[in-house]
Amino acid sequence: MDTLAIVIPFVPVLSAAIIFLFLRNRKGAAARLSVLATLLTFLLSLSLLGDYITSQVARVEWIGQIWGSIWLDPLALIMWTFVSGISLLVHMYSVRYMIEEPNYPRFFALLDLMTATIFFMVSAADLITLLVAWFLVGVFLYFLLGHDTDRSASGRYAFWTQITYRFGDLPLWLAAFILFKAYHSLSLPVIFAQVAAAPNAVQLWGMPVPAWVGILIAISAFARSAQFLLHGWLPYTMDGPTPVSALMHAGIVNAGGFLFNRFAPIFEYTSLALHIAFVVGLITAVLGSALMLIQNDIKRSLGYSTMGQMGFMVMECGLGAFPLAVFHLIAHGFFKASLFLGAGNAIGEARTEDGVPPDPVYVSVVERRPNKPSRLPLITAAALTILVPVLVLSLSHFFVASHLFFEQGVIILLFFAWVTGAQALFAAHKMTHSNPWQVMGGILGSFVLVVIGYTLISHYFGSFLYPEHGASERLFASASIGVLSYDVLVIILALLFVGGWALTFFADARDWGQHLSEKWHGTYVALYALLTRELYLNDFYVRMTQVLFAASRRLNVWFRWS
């Protein structure tokens, strides 16, 4: 198994080398070799994960003397299996999808190199390997996004992505430098052990080193995971090939969540970085979800959906729920990959069937079917909206891990889950249906299954990912805030949500919807314009680019460089 662990990341590298050297003009052979190499990588990764489950022994394998290491811990093995599985799906899809594209063998070689680089990144046990792999992921993504050299938009947005990634690399490089100078080691396990032994022993400008490093790592994760103010590149990568979009949105953009989890021993001792992550993630989740709803392009909508999901993932890290972020990363990866790979079919189906529900008049007159829609009683819907999510969430956590009720992060996550469940039930109340109880029952059943699955999986998955006793509790404790501030925050949020639902129920019952719509029409239009312009952030970046180019031209003239 020791030799196997070192061989696995080099299998895609070997495939890429063979394609570049011998199969440049043989499309079929290049595609078959690439798919087989990825399949072998997936099977070997799965076998290593199974071996760890039976042995429960994590280890570090060194390739070089100073750097070049592979850390076979639960996080790396799970990420290996996940990345190779997603990559296999993308490879298989690309065989036919990319067949008419130029540089067909080169595309598969780049996919192999990207897979290998991600493997080294998620399993790096030393700072140099991590930094080199982190950098190369951006380089290979640039070539994959700009694969079609005839499309100027692809190259332009690939360069935009590259610039954002390079900006996000700077904090990570600075954090690595601080860690090396403070703890005199490149090995991540050694650094983490020293931090755990004396977290406040080394100070920098009056603040412990873990606090500085946590903030820098969080900023780097924000750039890689398209958080607010650094998100503009993500929706515009849709000009790249669809398989690349699937791989990027399913795996590469999730690197921020991985980075938080890899440096979890650092975040145990830095509350400020986690609080920043929570705020940034919450803003990103809200804006990403809002921008997703107004898109008229299916791939652009998926891009903003990914932005919103990455915001939720970072928010989970900010709450101390690091294992839940990894589970979210994996679930979202497979879900989003399937959506991107099926986007073409969705567009084709929309051209033949728009999916618009038939008008009630058409149903009753043309099809001669009775139309007797009804709704649940207002009081019944309100009671189900408020009580059912609370009962399901509370009971599920009480029977699985009752001690988690004392963690602030868990309570906030339960609160957001309650809001989501209540929103679904409220939407069901507003639907007119011949059998509203059937609709409500289906939603309730789905909600119960999802919550129970989330509770069980997040608890046991967390125990697997962080087997050390007390690790999860320390992360939750690091993310906690003052009791008074926490209580005030929860009360304000609860009043806002409950008050909003009550107002909506009342307005709906009194038929005030049309009146409110007319009164606030101007506000709605202004908000819609603001969202369609993407908060004018991209316009600001374009203007700044023009200013920089103009300044550079003046410098060229003054210094006679050209």
Image (cartoon, rainbow, N blue to C red):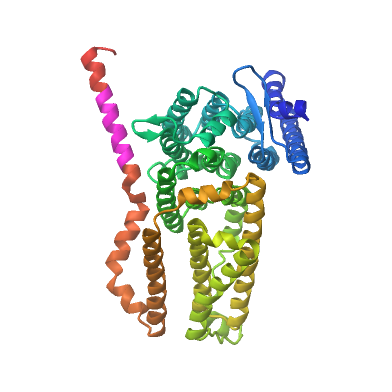
For this view, does 212 lie left or right of residue 525? right
The magenta region covers 540-552
Image quarter of the N terminus: top right
Image quarter of the C terminus: top left
Q: Nearer the viewer, residue 131 or 193?
A: 193
Q: Position of residue 314 (x, y in %)?
A: 48, 48
Q: Can residue 72 be seen at all in this image of the molecule?
A: yes
Q: Is residue 545 above or below residue 376?
A: above
Picture quadrant where residue 14 is located = top right
The number of numbered discs placed on residues in the rendered structure image is: 0
Q: Position of residue 362 (x, y in %)?
A: 54, 80
For this view, does 515 lie left or right of residue 235? left
Q: Nearer the viewer, residue 84 or 174?
A: 174
Q: Position of residue 73 (x, y in %)?
A: 66, 37
Q: Is residue 396 above or below residue 388?
A: above
Q: Can residue 147 be seen at all in this image of the molecule?
A: no
Residue at 54%, 62% in the rendered image: 405
Picture quadrant where residue 487 is located = bottom left
Residue 12 magenta: no
Task: Give the dominant element type of the magenta stretch: helix, strand or loop.
Answer: helix
Q: Is residue 204 above or below residue 342?
A: above
Residue at 51%, 65% in the rendered image: 420
Q: Position of residue 28 (x, y in %)?
A: 74, 31
Residue at 64%, 25% in the rendered image: 69
Residue 544 magenta: yes
